[in-house]
Amino acid sequence: MKIFFIWFTILLAGCISSIPIVSEIDISKAQVQWNGVTLEQLRSDRELYIVKCSGCHSLYKPDQYSDAEWNSILPTMNIKSKLSSVESEQIKRYLSLYSMK
Ligand code: HEC
């Protein structure tokens, strides 16, 4: 049982660590597009993505899709996750920061 728990924790950590953490380096890039956005805001965008989008399937990496592809996928997924319009903008902002472009 204990072994199983350790194995499960490692597996879970592995999945989430492939979802990029927002760092100081990304801030200047982000501020070109979202004037005045802070590191804290972008980190909470990421948290929201992890919490809201991992319920039904494993998390997709932001760079698996281009902005245009995310824009066509997100409206359906926003409904599935029952996001508010503010939450959907946050998740879109996070994904766009690391998307394929
Ligand atoms: C209620 C369950 C549910 C939730 C919550 C959910 N999804 Fe999905 N997602 C699905 C299902 C089912 C599919 C595959 C079938 C489809 O495309 O509808 C899917 C497919 C996807 C795909 C692949 C689409 C493609 O065209 O290959 C992406 C990317 C995705 N989801 C992203 C997200 C994101 C981002 C969120 C959070 C905003 C999210 N999902 C939340 C159920 C969900």
Image (cartoon, helix red, strand yellow):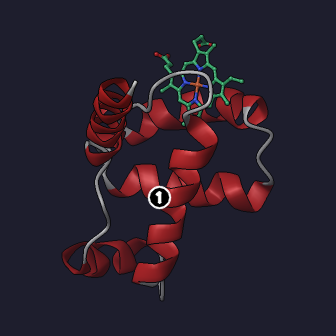
Q: Residue at x 31, y 52 (%)?
A: 98
Q: Nearer the viewer, residue 38 or 28?
A: 38
Residue drawn at the location 41% of the way across and 42% of the way down: 67
Image location of residue 88, percent across then percent down: 67, 51
Q: Secondary structure at mark 1?
A: helix
Q: Residue furthest left?
A: 25
What percent of the width, then of the height, locates residue 55?
62, 30
- Give how far across and how far down residue 42 sits, in percent: 46, 71
> Could you tell me the amino acid type at mark 1?
Arg
Is 67 in front, or is 98? 98
Q: Horizontally, is 82 left or right of 69 in the view?
A: right
Which quadrant does ligand 1 occupy?
top right
Identify whether 99 is placed above or below 8. below
Q: Is residue 19 above or below residue 94?
A: above
> Going 35% across and 24% down the picture, which residue do you hit?
4
Which image quadrant: the N terminus?
top left
Q: Write down the residue under mark 1.
A: 46
Examine the image and state in which quarter residue 101 appears.
top left
| 34 left or right of 25 in image | right
